[in-house]
Image (cartoon, rainbow, N blue to C red):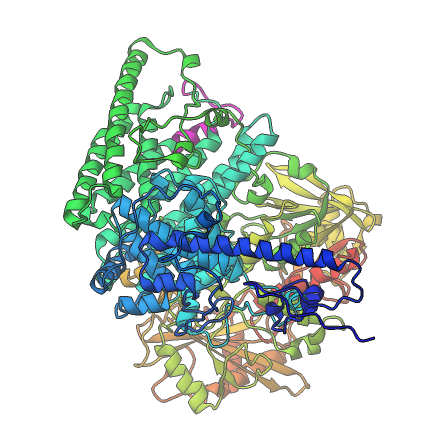
Amino acid sequence: MERARPAVGHSSTYGQACMHCYKAKCRCHRLRKECLPSDSIRRRNPPRAEESDARIAQLEGRIEIMLSAMQSIAGPSGFSAEILGLLNEERIPLSTSGVNNTPADSISTNPSISGVPTPATDPSPLVQAGINLPSPFQYSPSPSGPSSLQAEECLKFFRSQMLPYFPFINLSPDIPAWQLQQDRPFLFQAILTVTTFSTQKRLARIEDLKRILFTSALLEVQSNIDLLLGLLTYLAWSTDAFLGRADLMSRLMVLAISLVYDMRLFKPLRLDTKLMMTMTQGKDYEGDQNPDNETVADFMEKQRAVLACFVLSSNISSHLGRIDALRWTPQMEEALRIIETNTSSLADKAFAFQVRLQLLKQKAAHIREQNEIDRARTATASVITSMPGLLYLTTLREQLHGLISSFPPDFPQRGLGDAQRTGAFITHAHYVELYINQLAYSISCDSPPLDLSGPTTGGGQLPGFERLKCLWGSVESIRSWLNNFYKFSSSDLVGLPFHFWSQMILCVTILKYLSVLEDPTWNRQDVRNAVDLIAAIDVMIQKLDRVGIESNLQCDDSLYNLLSKLLSKCRVWAGARLNKACQIQGVDLNHGADSSETSHNSNIPDLDQMMWMQSMDLENEQCPEPKLNRVELLRADLPAVLGIGIAQLAYLLPLAAADWTETQWDAIVVGAGPAGIIVATRLAEANLKTLLLEGGGPSYGVTGGDLSSRRPSWLNNTDLTRVDVPGLYSSIFGDGGGLICSGTINAYGGCTIGGGSAINAGLYFEPPSSDWDSFFPIGWRATDMGGAIERVKARSPSTDTPSADGKQYLQSGYDVVRRWIVDSLGFADVKINESKDNKFDVFGRPVYGYEDGQRAGPVPTYLQDALKLPNFHLQSGTRVVRVQRTSNVATGVWVLLNGVETLVPLSNTGRVVISAGAIATPGLLMFSGIGPAAELTRLSAAGKLGNLTHEDWISNDAVGANLFDNPNTFIELSSPSITAFAPSYDNPDPVDSALYLGQRSGPYAFAGQTSVFFTRASQPDGRIVGFQGTIGTAGYADFTSPTTITLNVYGTSGLASRGSVVLDGSFIPGPDGNVYYSAPPDASAIAGFIARIFAALPADVETLNLERNASVARIEQYITTPSAYARGQVNHWSGSCKIGACADEGGRVVGTGNMWVADASLLEPLSVNPMFGVMTVGEKVAEMILKGVGA
């Protein structure tokens, strides 16, 4: 019998349950399907079903009543007709794609809710139903909507007087208010709110804003850029934190963060998440916030928004302490990079500067948070545990100084705004420095007081000195902050965002504490002489009192009136405290003080721990003196133990402690060169306990240490050294700067963190596939190396446009040589790395391992990732003497510490990886009893092999053999068309230095090679030899006229000449005399190449040190005769531990069970500079090792 279909159920505002809904566990309108009620097979209790229907109808009616009540509350609020219409019937129009990708010029509508009475005519349905309503808001009724003229004035004021202080929105000066209201309705309402300066009127507008936000974000669950920008605008210029409404700010900030998450601005949505959402929702995922039709302006708008969300959440987290800041992600870093490089907008440059400042502050905040966690776990503090944190904060402080020095002082002249507005950014920087100083003080405050009467003992007094240094640094930071504040006119103050006023209050509070600090080593009078607290407060009050007059605010309840009242009360209690402190100090000076009565742990609060800031209400006439609460007093006595381990900052602090020497390591990597850093990073990331040992010291600015010893004075107040600045690389050849090997190898090499990658020009060419296929064994062919190559490229950046502004500089030599090599000789002009497999007759711009105008490489990339890992330790300034072996198994390494050999052990399953370079690695193997028998005999006779007996030797003549370096020749070229440039280490042209410091651009943003060319030639013996030429920007040796440049020509792959690594009379390793031209055909091949290119020289180009019409025989004689221009070391050392002879196909040292080599020793001569190849070797050996451990 056919079942009767039930009648369609009664209508409701939200749909009716049906089979589709039941199956998908959601409403049918989400599936875009017809709503069909389910058929029941059996009806056992029909009356009960009818009763259930009635129950549902009753619940629906109540929901309708509640919705109507919301409308009735909104009715008398003074909304414009348009807003009321939006609340009653329509969605708020969106200007950019949200969840539904609504076009900017359209308004999506929803059907009216049936049965909902209009607020103007019907009484509240809750009243009709007898439901008790909560009490209405206690604020004044909402002001009437602004006229079109008022709206234009509000927008103009916001754009010109407020936005320049926090330029996270690009508001075109041409956009009228009506257009903004149509395109960005919520942002428009937020602007109206923040440009209302009367506190009572603003509170009423805030309620309007909250109702719109409630409808859009909560009822309609919208997530779009309009809501986000409006929220951020309101939060940036909010006064709630000063009116007892900090909870509202924190909740709105959390809502803004949720919008960032919903719109996927902080990081992209994973593919598996998209697939899961598609499967569970039964339709394609529609939440992509980056549609294909997105414009550049839309894209940049979102980048600014997510960065503004970070800045505001960080400030609110710090000042109010109720939320966590938005987590910084790689996508946000990329967003910041994009904003920084937007040369078309000076406002973006300023905004990026603000974000960088806040990012530094947030990094410091992470230290504080981790410190608090560790304090909770630890009962005592020590000098050793606090030292890494202090050094890390020192590094942050140096980075801050570098950031400040990079801020262009000419921004006002370049159109950003007047000096006061740009001064606001520097004021922010001084507050960040104050924050870092106070945090360093809180870390060091647990150390004993300074004992100034006698010598220090055990190194335990350093934090005491650091504590005083931090305190005085805070005084200087506050003085700088105030000096910038004094430059503001009163009318300028009206546009400053919320965080500026929080900073002001906190600066005054900290200055009060510093002025009355009770500490036997602290001179309070010096503080008052430097910064007069009372005088500072008086100036602030005067400026605030004139804001309303000069800006014509026409109200007496603005934030500035309230702040003036607060400061007036602060002046009273500050004066009382200062007078009391003067009396106490007078007693101390005249009669002495009992040290037990004046604890060095005086109660200066952490800037993030002033709880009274979180409940401030300036409308309340009761405004007591800020006091430390019980939690803060307890916190002042907790130990200063940081979560950043000593291992993570070992390169900043050469430790005398023995903990790292006693740990049993899963991997010990010898040498922090490019390959060693990569291997160590990869092993540590695979959870192996990894120790990286480096004989040299710091290099890049990020490696810390005494920066002044590694840079010229014009880089002072930055975080840069000569290593970071590409244009200064050649200066290292002159004096070494403590970066090159001295007394450890008989060759030029980098003995510093980064090794050769820290001292070379940074040329970064990917080898052609034919190099791997022709010169390397199975397992190392091009297809085998693909994964390692891609991992290097993904992690280490490169560019052929090194200047951050995207311009090419010093191009006169490039133009001349291109005319020669391309136009005359017929070489193809190509992108070198994009055409990596073509090395026959090609010309192009050099590719550098740089990023944003600074040297990149493994140190700023791989190493920084490794330092974040708790199982990784870098120990610099530590020379490895030899590897300790038992038979063929390494059990540890011997290091030289303070002249004493110390054994660092391996775990039972550990391994040693030697990455000391193609000269030092064979030498270390020999000292470890592995190498040619003759060398081992000499070492044994001299007692250099430790406890190794003759039976323990691993004789292998391949150790140190096959050593290669490119033979090179300098050709000096001169032409009237050339303008030479030689960088100056100490005295660069002011324009060039300013360009680099301000924008990381100009001549100092690259190493001076303007062009490069490659070719190959078959030889009579069947070999194919490669050749390379690079063009510099200046002459050399005897030829340095203003029209002279240098061509560096050398042979590459296919050359037959090889030498060996040998030990001299002092057992220092170095090359023998067979490296260059020991195979005569090599000289003939290179001479033939030079003769070929000379034949095409343009008439206006002259060769200065070798005749342009020289014969091949003459050229061969010239290049093989040692001079300043020929047979020089290019220092591309490689090949000294040949795969298959010295090391097996996995990179393991032949004859051993757990010793590997990972550096240029494994490389055969390549067709290009070897740096890229060396890094690829690091990735490949790490891959081989991890295969063996199953990782």
- Quadrant placement of the C terminus: bottom right
Q: Position of residue 1007 (x, y in %)?
A: 43, 66
Residue 458: within the magenta? yes
Query: In the displayed structure, does residue 1060 sit left or right of residue 3?
Result: left
Q: Quadrant of residue 820?
A: bottom left
The vertical placement of 773 against 719, above or below, is below
Residue 92 seen from this side:
yes
Using the image as rendered, state which of residue 88 and residue 689 is in the foreground. Answer: 88
Using the image as rendered, state which of residue 503 and residue 591 is in the foreground. Answer: 503
Residue 354 seen from this side:
no
Residue 606: within the magenta? no
The vertical placement of 243 against 411, above or below, is above
Give the residues in magenta.
Answer: 452-470
Query: In the displayed structure, does residue 554 sit left or right of residue 580?
Result: left
Query: In the displayed structure, does residue 1071 sit left or right of residue 959?
Result: left
Q: Position of residue 811 (x, y in %)?
A: 36, 76
Q: Residue at x 31, y 70 (%)?
A: 179
The vertical placement of 88 against 714, above or below, is below
Q: How many badges with numbers are in the image?
A: 0
Q: Residue at x 45, y 87 (%)?
A: 822
Q: Position of residue 213 (x, y in %)?
A: 42, 56
Q: Position of residue 509 (x, y in %)?
A: 33, 32
Residue at far right of view: 951
